[in-house]
Amino acid sequence: MPKQNNQILTHSDLIQLKRWNTPTIYNGWEQITKQNPASDAFNLEETHDFMPQMGPMVGYAVTLVIEPSNPQHKVSNSNAYAEYLHYVAHTPGPKIVVVQDLDKPQIVGSFWGEVNSNVHKSLGCVGTITDGAVRDLDEMTNAGFKALAKRLCVGHAFVSCVKWNCEVEVFGRKVLPGDLIHADKHGFIVIAPEEQSGLLEAAQFMDANECNTIIPAASNAAGQTMDEILENIDHSRKAFNKNIKEKFKREGEF
């Protein structure tokens, strides 16, 4: 059975997570995860962020499968779109719609455009991740609906809802309904429920750890000799790793 949204994080937590880019969230998650390898959480294939100016998005996954090349889906269930929207509407938000396009890699039509972005925005969705296409890019941006997708597309073909509230796979990563997702121009990361509660604190700690050790040592090098620069970087690197070991009981990365 698909996982359901348990709303582990508060709205305040989600707002704060949105202030960081996705690599920073990964840096924090890496300290608390028990997954091995750590790449098991983020996209393995390249994504394209068509609204980078909107910054990161964070939300809980609602899932959908489409196959725009196949007209039979509209015939077999003419009420599929209404049923799918009912599922989206009654799932707690904020939500990110994760859409698997069965036509990949031969993408022939887009589920997303001006209409669907506005419809889903009204239902509490903040954006989409799809291995298919998007269109009406300016209109989607105007709706405040962010999109990570494979490419742009002109038409919609025979796009219909094939199935929803199910496991999907996009950009080499499996996603279940209710998974927490953080996404931006770098890609996206999927956070399991048991790893969500400590995520914000870990990300904040790792960012502060960088800013208090290695980054200032490397950026304040004016007037120093190369030996002095290397000595300061080595000292700050050790401090960086020591902080990680004391906080998370694990070895640092440098």
Image (cartoon, grey):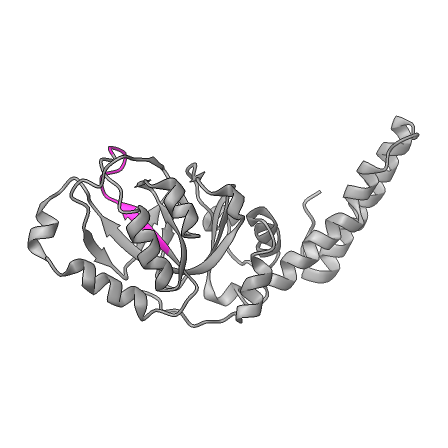
> Toward which corner of the image does residue 69 lie, by quadrant?
top left
Q: Which quadrant holds the N terminus?
A: bottom left
Is 241 contained in the magenta span? no
Q: Residue at x 51, y 42 (%)?
A: 52
The answer to whether 51 appears left or right of 23 in the picture is left
Q: Is residue 51 visible?
A: yes
What range of the chain is rendered magenta? 97-106
- In the image, residue 240 above or below residue 246: above
Check the image and name the residue furthest to the top. Answer: 226
Q: Nearer the viewer, residue 68 or 235?
A: 68
- Image spot of residue 144 (x, y percent): 44, 52
Horizontal relation, residue 158 to residue 121: left or right: left
* Image-based side of 236 in relation to 47, left or right: right
Q: State left or right for residue 118 relative to residue 35.
A: left
Question: What is the total number of numbered labels drawn onto the structure image?
Answer: 0
Question: Can you give x and y, in whole percent of width and height, for residue 101 in the image?
Answer: 26, 44
Residue at the image position 43 percent from the left and 38 percent from the top = 48
Q: Residue at x 87, y 27 (%)?
A: 226
Q: Nearer the viewer, residue 27 or 138?
A: 138
Picture quadrant of residue 84? bottom left
Q: Position of residue 219 (x, y in %)?
A: 81, 37
Is the residue 191 above or below the residue 138 in the image? below
Q: Report the quarter where the C terminus lies.
A: top right
Q: Is residue 100 magenta?
A: yes
Residue 22 location (% of width, % of height): 55, 49
Q: Is residue 146 visible?
A: no
